[in-house]
Amino acid sequence: MAEEKESTSIPLSQAAEAVDPEDPAKSPPRPSSPTTSTRKACCAVLQSWVSRKFMTGCVVLFPVAVTFFITWWFIQFVDGFFSPLYAQLGIDIFGLGFLTSLVFIFLVGIFVSSWVGSTIFWVGEWFIKKMPFVRHIYSASKQVSTAISPDQNTTAFKEVAIIRHPRIGEYAFGFITSTVVLQTDKGDEELCSVYVPTNHLYIGDIFLVNSEEIIRPNLSIREGIEIIVSGGMTMPQVIASMEPIPRKSQNIRLNRMT
């Protein structure tokens, strides 16, 4: 009997390594088969491909969705000015208020271009500029609208300019607003007033730069505004420099102090 008990006894080290069928966590890991490794690699490649294509679709559809949303909101916003008037008349045609608003804006442009309209507009603008808070909002928005005005009057941006700023080897986009003749002992020097925006188009610095040191690119005013507002994302790949265009704007002469 003693010999049978000794033959059936198991050492403690072997008992610790024994597999417990009721506790799978304590069982030793099984070696992975080649089929399982191939399946995991295929799943990882498929997941990466799906994620990449999904992000590509988001990148393509995001500007389309934003453009559609803003356009749709703008149409509804403009249509809301005259659509209630047509609703009272019993006319329910979508887009009719939007077309009426476009015609109204066109007629306002014709009216303001006349002497009477410009006088009335000047009086209304004078009242707005006397308001404490509204005048700052109006001045900022007036600056942008004047810059892209087709009339290109004396207060509008004349040309897009590239100047060496803030140091040699670095350049900054700006807009030429006027010209100045600076009188010195060495003779007259023509300077250009260049407005360099630092916060989109509402806040910026003014630099007086020699007209010969200004680089005039082949960009229109609208293209320059798009580049600055977009943070440089609409920058063309190639920018060519043009010859200085003779300007007919009125020069401002600075008298020397004696």
Image (cartoon, rainbow, N blue to C red):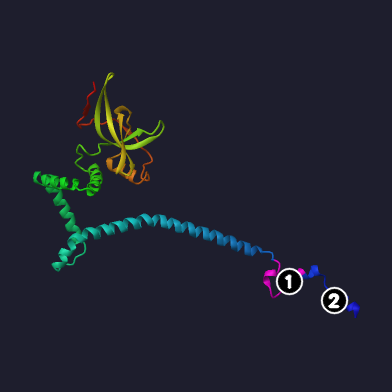
Q: Secondary structure at mark 2?
A: helix
- From the image, which quarter does the N terminus lie in? bottom right
Highlighted magenta segment, given as a residue range: 16-28
Q: Position of residue 195 (x, y in %)?
A: 29, 37
Q: Secondary structure at mark 1?
A: loop
- From the image, which quarter does the C terminus lie in? top left
Farthest residue, direction top: 185
- Residue 178 is left or right of residue 37, and the answer is left
Mark number displayed over residue 8: 2
* Mark 1, residue position: 19
Question: Relative to 88, is 182 above or below?
Answer: above
Q: Would residue 218 be seen by someone viewing this image from the given angle?
A: no
Q: Position of residue 50 (x, y in %)?
A: 49, 60
Q: Position of residue 212 (x, y in %)?
A: 31, 27
- Quarter occupied by residue 165: top left
Q: Are marks 1 and 2 in contact (CB under 8 Å)?
A: no
Residue type at mark 1: give it: Val
Depth order, front residue of 243/187: 187
Residue drawn at x 27%, y 40% is 221
Q: Would residue 54 be seen by someone viewing this image from the given angle?
A: yes
Residue type at mark 2: give it: Thr
- Residue 118 is left or right of residue 236, and the answer is left
- Quarter occupied by residue 182: top left
